[in-house]
Amino acid sequence: MPRMTARSRHESHRASTPLELFFDLCFVVAVAQAGARLVHALAEGHVGAGLAGYAVVFFAIWWAWMNFTWFASAYDTDDPLYRVVTLVQITGVLILAAGVPRAFDDGDFTIAVIGYIVMRLALTSQWLRAAATGRDAAERRVCLRYAAGLVVCQLGWVGMLFVPESAHIWVFPLLVLAELSVPLLAERDHTTSWHPHHIAERYGLFTLIVLGETVSAATIAVQEALDEHDELGDLLPLAAGGLLIVFAAWWIYFAVPIHDHLRSNREAFAWGYGHYAVLASAAAIGAGLEVAIEQTVGKAHISAVSAAAAVTVPAALFLLTVWLLHARHFKRGLVQQLILPVAAVLVLLCTFAGRAGVPLAGAVAALTVATALVLSRRA
């Protein structure tokens, strides 16, 4: 067996590989499926069930991506065996994506769990390979803890399939807590050699992919609305506002380099876990734009305020969580620190403008970027 030697945390010019980019792109299928089901639920007025289903499904998508990303940052040898096992993980991702509609609509997680089994078998073999060729006892111990944690958690997900659906509301949070605790317990006395710059780049690339899916979904929704209803005058302001929100989201996320902040597991894990809200809200913006478009042309039987909220709420959440994870570490002075939290509140207030809410929120987002630029130059 070829050695799987841990990579150096101080390796220069570390960048994402084509295989990692391919892995990310395959997740677009799952993200698109989750967004489509959220659109359907919100358009039908099933807000509570839609948001709960979206939160559950997006966690499954995000956590699968997280598991691979942090392992690859420490142990990506890019040899033939590593590539083949990663391709097996991609197969599991596609099975997971196929199971998203059933999990979202019917609470049937069978296909999604099968996809996870495929991914987990592959990833567990990677951790065992790293343990077998580890350089010291501490490193081998961490790898074995990860492998054991993956197996135990996966047995829990399989077990969930055999409990009544009414019990899922209690079982699912417990399994989520178990999943989140695995890295904390595995690395409690020894840290894997994840690369700060590489991790920051990986998260940035996945955020780009999610924002790109948001633009794609909104564009297709506008095209379909024009083909069926020819409501160009009503759709143009909506499309413009949505684009401004997405452009501002990109600008704000990538305004500062974050890798220097990721000095230890304490900062990096909190930052990484917090990205669940960043990525879920970014993807939800696209779903919200589709809902707003459907409401404008009369396909969604909900109020204009509810349709606007489908965009403004995730947009405000994105602004707030990016401030918590990124921007606040680089802002100087109270005025700079308040820009994004105040912008999040203003975007939420735009909800009550009804059909004008999305264009107004887009204007607020653009003004937020402009204000931040002016203040940073003065500073």
Image (cartoon, grey):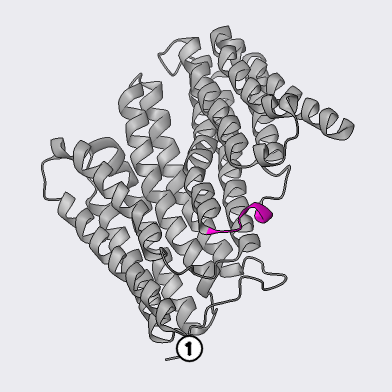
Quarter the C terminus occupies = top right
The residue sitting at 45% across, 10% down in the picture is 303
In the figure, 335 relative to 167: above or below?
above
Quadrant of res 200: bottom right
Indicate yes or no whether the magenta region holds residue 263.
Answer: yes
The residue sitting at 46% across, 14% down in the picture is 306
Indicate yes or no whether the magenta region holds residue 186.
Answer: no
Give the residue furthest to the right: 378
Residue 232 visible at all: no
Q: Position of residue 188 (x, y in %)?
A: 40, 63
Instruction: Judge from the rendering whether residue 196 lies leftward or rightward of residue 159; answer left or right.
Output: right
How many marks overall? Answer: 1
Out of 284 and 199, give the one closest to the viewer.
199
Out of 267 and 245, give the one closest to the viewer.
267
The residue sitting at 27% across, 42% down in the picture is 173
Residue 234 visible at all: yes
- Segment tinted magenta in the rendering: 259-264
Give the residue furthest to the front: 189
In the figure, 100 relative to 318: above or below?
below
Q: Position of residue 370 (x, y in %)?
A: 80, 27
Q: Amino acid at mark 1?
A: Arg
Q: Which residue is mark 1?
A: 3
The residue sitting at 23% across, 54% down in the picture is 157
Instruction: Judge from the rendering whether residue 206 lies leftward or rightward of residue 157; answer left or right.
Output: right
Instruction: Classify mark 1: helix, strand or loop.
Output: loop
Circle 1 Cα neighbour tier, 10 Å, few/some/many (<14 / 14–19 / ≥20): few
Out of 40 and 372, give the one closest to the viewer.
372
In the figure, 320 relative to 10: above or below?
above
In the figure, 253 relative to 137: above or below?
above
Give the residue furthest to the top: 353
Quarter the N terminus occupies = bottom left
Q: Position of residue 285 (x, y in %)?
A: 54, 31
